[in-house]
Amino acid sequence: MESPAGLHHVAVRCADLGRCETFYREVLGLEVLRRWPAEGGGDRSVWLKAGEGGAFVALEHADGDATRSAFDAAPAGWYVVALRIERSERRAWEQRLASHGVAVARKSPWSVFFQDPEGNRIALTHWPEEA
């Protein structure tokens, strides 16, 4: 475990998810990989293939949900850069972050989220393999 294995995905918060999806599909030619439904209907997120190797662009609806944590309540714009790690290395990465004084902002079954010194969001992820 010297460094992450590569770029996993880049997430963009979109005020108008449909308009952004159309742009990334029609202008950039990216193919839809997966849709994540919103609780009230429609899409919460659309994932688009970004080259070979499994990297993707995640378009996330910027809904302004007041129940989100300060970390997750970001406005529209670039949201997170996710670096690929092996599931078996997750614990070692969490320990490495802690040893450098980096606070983990949030965890999911697939990812560990934190911020760089300027507040930019970074994730280490092993999706689709759960921890």
Image (cartoon, helix red, strand yellow):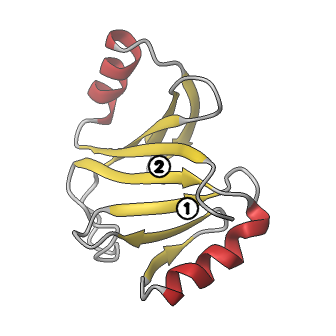
64 vs 69, nearest the viewer: 69
Residue 47 vertical placement versus 116 (above, below): above
Residue 24 vertical placement versus 123 (above, below): above
Q: Position of residue 29 (x, y in %)?
A: 43, 12
Q: Position of residue 66 (x, y in %)?
A: 26, 72
Q: Secondary structure at mark 1?
A: strand
Picture quarter with the C terminus:
bottom right
* Residue 131 appears in the rendering: no
Quarter of the figure with residue 121: bottom left
Q: Position of residue 109 (x, y in %)?
A: 67, 67
Could you say which disc has been placed on residue 93 in the image?
none
Q: Residues within 10 Å of mark 1 (few under 14, many from 20)?
A: many
Give, as a three-letter code, the residue at label 2: Ala
Give, as a three-letter code, the residue at label 1: Leu
How many badges with numbers are in the image?
Answer: 2
- At 27% from the left and 73% from the top, the residue drawn is 117
Q: Secondary structure at mark 2?
A: loop
- At 48% from the left and 76% from the top, the residue drawn is 106
**Alpha carbons under labels 2 and 1: distance apart:** 24 Å
38 vs 81, nearest the viewer: 81
- At 59% from the left and 59% from the top, the residue drawn is 3
* 2 vs 1, front mark: 1
- At 53% from the left and 53% from the top, the residue drawn is 83
Q: Position of residue 82 (x, y in %)?
A: 49, 53
| Residue at mark 2 | 38
| Residue at mark 1 | 124
Q: Is residue 94 left or right of residue 71?
A: right
Quarter of the figure with residue 22: top left
